[in-house]
């Protein structure tokens, strides 16, 4: 369903298991950034009422998830700490900016939707892995509960890319983006971060 072309390296779970604090801190900031991104989309595209409604719901859900992850940190005696950089997200952004045909207003909108969809898709895949393979039973259940909302967000962003990206071959652009993301995964899955 997600369409990802390269699965996460199975050894990633072992890396994560050795430092649950790091994955939880990184995850908390991923949720916060997703909420901020939804707000940014509302500010940039207020003319699309259905998009505004969907982004409002996503923002609220992402902040709820942030709070849930923060509670997991507190329960375990961990602290939130400072925000981490996300090289994976940066690599995705660079790829989308490189293509000059993407610089029209509509092209930029489609890119923004595809960018968000990709992050949600990979996060969903990672949550599924954590829900199945972590030894920590509490976190297995926790990640299972979050996985479905990530899948829903992924399809929401793709829906809006197609709805308001008329004149752009969204499927073709998404396919190229998936191929690029697969090539990226060869250098990731080595750190105890959500996308690392």
Image: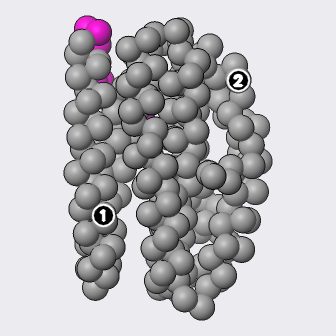
Q: Could you give the CA–CA distance between mark 1 and mark 2, rounded to whole angstroms?
A: 33 Å
Span highlighted in magenta in the image: 76-85
| SS category of the residue bearing label 2 | loop
| SS category of the residue bearing label 1 | helix
Give the label on residue 10, or none: 2
Along the line of sight, which residue is nearer the eye, 63 or 21? 63
Residue 122 place in picture, x, y as percent: 57, 44
Which coloring applies here? Answer: one colour
The quarter holding residue 42 reads bottom left
Residue 8 place in picture, x, y as percent: 68, 33
Along the line of sight, which residue is nearer the eye, 144 or 15? 144
Q: Is residue 196 above or below residue 72?
A: below
Q: Residue at x 31, y 82 (%)?
A: 48
In the drawing, does residue 193 fall left or right of residue 169?
left
Q: Earlier in the sequence, mark 1 or mark 2?
A: 2
Report which residue position mark 1 lands on: 55
Q: Is residue 7 above or below residue 24?
A: below
Q: Residue furthest bottom?
A: 167
Q: Main secondary structure of the magenta part?
A: loop
Residue 132 place in picture, x, y as percent: 56, 22
Along the line of sight, which residue is nearer the eye, 59 or 86? 59
Q: Residue at x 56, y 54 (%)?
A: 118
Magenta region includes residue 141: no
Magenta region includes residue 79: yes
Q: Is residue 127 above or below residue 38?
A: above
Counting other residues with Cα less than 10 Å from the Cα at mark 2, is it few (<14), some (14-19), or many (20 or more)? few
Q: Residue at x 60, y 91 (%)?
A: 167
């Amino acid at each position: 369903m997600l369409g990802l072309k390269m699965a996460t390296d199975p050894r990633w779970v072992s890396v994560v298991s050795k430092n649950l604090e790091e994955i939880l801190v990184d995850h908390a900031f991923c949720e916060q950034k997703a909420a901020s991104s939804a707000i940014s989309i509302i500010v940039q595209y207020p003319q699309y009422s259905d998009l505004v409604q969907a982004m409002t719901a996503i923002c609220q859900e992402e902040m709820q998830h942030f709070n849930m992850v923060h509670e997991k940190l507190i329960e375990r005696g961990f602290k939130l700490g400072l925000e981490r950089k996300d090289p994976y997200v940066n690599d995705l952004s660079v790829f989308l900016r490189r293509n000059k045909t993407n610089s029209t207003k509509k092209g930029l909108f489609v890119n923004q939707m595809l960018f968000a969809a990709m992050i949600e898709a990979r996060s969903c895949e990672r949550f599924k892995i954590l829900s199945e393979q972590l030894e920590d039973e509490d976190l297995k259940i926790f990640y299972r509960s979050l996985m479905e909302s990530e899948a829903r967000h992924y399809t929401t962003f793709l829906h809006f890319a197609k709805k308001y990206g008329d004149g752009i071959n969204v499927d073709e652009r998404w396919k190229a983006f998936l191929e690029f993301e697969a090539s990226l995964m060869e250098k990731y899955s080595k750190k105890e971060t959500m996308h690392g």
